[in-house]
Image: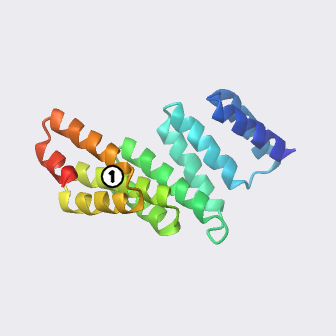
Amino acid sequence: MATDFFLRGEAHRLLCNNEKALADYASSLELEPWAPPCYYARGLCLKDLGDVTQAAEEFEKSLLIQNPETSSLIGAKTYASLGECRTALEQYQASLDCFSKAIEASDDHSVLAHCHFSRAEVHQYLGDMDAAKVDFAKCLEHNPDYARSLLQFASDEMAAGRHQSAVIIYT
């Protein structure tokens, strides 16, 4: 029964019906309160709804009850999502820690590329351009298609007058 609610919640989430998804996830958790994927999915919904503080709490709950031995990809994605929330909350050191843990936990190239890109952005916010450059390069090692994203990001930085940042990204 808990699985049925969870799967219906997933269908609602994928259709961007976040409120209905949250209701189904709540029903699922009433029946099975130790379900890390359900907390992760609730975090995704809340993040999409703009409640990054509550989303971060859901991601943290998911991480508390996950078995890292059996769920490295979901753990990596959860740490990455938590890192995005921490960035949005301007908790940059916590964000760097989350992205670093996601990188350690994953061997999936798309997750690794995303995390290196996101960690590079945080390094830029903190003014550590050398570290940002290293992470941008690692991002491209894992997924050369991120080059378009990097070029767009560099162009946006240039347009915003952040020339040093743009040069770091371009190089």
In this view, the residue in front, 29 or 159, is: 159
Q: Circle 1 is placed at which residue position? A: 92
Identify the residue at horizontal 44%, vertical 45% (top origin): 85
User: Mark 1 is on which residue type?
Assistant: Tyr
Query: How many callouts does the rendering have?
Result: 1
Identify the residue at horizontal 14%, vertical 41% (top origin): 162
Percent x, y for residue 154? 23, 43
Identify the residue at horizontal 45%, vertical 64% (top origin): 103
* Crowd tier of the residue under label 1, counting other residues whose Cα lies within 10 Å: few below 14, some 14–19, many 20 or above: many
Percent x, y for residue 158? 16, 38
Q: Quadrant of residue 99?
A: bottom left
Say if residue 102 shows up in the picture: yes
Q: Is residue 92 above or below residue 142?
A: above
Say if residue 94 shows up in the picture: no
Q: Is residue 102 left or right of residue 131?
A: right
Q: Is residue 15 above or below residue 154?
A: above
